[in-house]
Image (cartoon, rainbow, N blue to C red):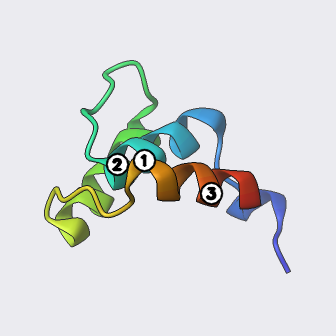
């Protein structure tokens, strides 16, 4: 079960999306969002692992 503590904020979600799509970091994101972005990039090694078509499908499912 999800709690409010486990939900991402708007900028954390944007950071995760950008990292998975191989987009650049936005300096306006919160520190936590930037850490999420960096963490995802470390795992994916900077690769765009979700293509443009796939991302729209994933976003629609959320």
| Horizontal and vertical percent position of residue 45 | 14, 64
Mark 3 → mark 2, Cα distance in angstroms: 13 Å
The N terminus: image quadrant:
bottom right
Going from N to C along the chain, the mark reached first, 2 or 1, is 2
Which sits earlier in the primary sequence, circle 1 or circle 3? 1
Residue 21's label in the rendered image is 2
What whole-number distance in Å separates the C-alpha atoms at marks 1 and 3? 9 Å
In the visual, does 61 lie left or right of 39?
right
In front of the other: 57 or 62:
57
Question: Residue 61 in the image: x percent, y percent?
Answer: 74, 61
Residue 62 visible in the picture = no
Q: Give the mark nearest the N terminus, 3 or 2.
A: 2
User: Is 5 rendered above or below residue 19?
Assistant: below
Kindly state the secondary structure of the residue where label 1 is placed. helix
Q: Image point 42% across, 47% down: which residue?
A: 52
Mark 2 or 1: in front is 1
Residue located farthest toward the top when viewing the structure as drawn: 28
Disc number placed over residue 52 in the picture, else none? 1
| Crowd class of label 1 (few under 14; some 14 to 19; many from 20; radius 10 Å) | few
**Residue at position x 82%, y 57% in the image:** 4
For label 3, the residue is: 57
Eye-nearest disc, 3 or 2: 3
- Check if mark 2's residue and mark 1's residue have beta carbons within 8 Å: yes
Question: Quadrant where the C terminus lies?
Answer: bottom right
Residue 51 screen position, x and y as percent: 37, 55
Q: Residue at x 58, y 49 (%)?
A: 56
Circle 3 — which element?
helix
The x and y percentages for residue 42 are 18, 64
Residues 19 and 55: in front is: 55
Q: Residues within 10 Å of mark 3 (few under 14, many from 20)?
A: few
Label 2, residues with CA under 10 Å away: few <14, some 14-19, many ≥20: some
- Relative to 27, does residue 55 appear above or below in the rendering? below
């Amino acid at each position: 079960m999800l709690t409010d503590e486990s939900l991402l904020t708007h900028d954390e979600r944007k950071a995760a999306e950008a990292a998975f799509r191989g987009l650049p970091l936005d300096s306006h994101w919160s520190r936590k969002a930037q850490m999420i972005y960096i963490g995802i990039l470390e795992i994916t090694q900077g690769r765009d692992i979700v293509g443009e078509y796939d991302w729209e499908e994933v976003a629609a499912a959320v």
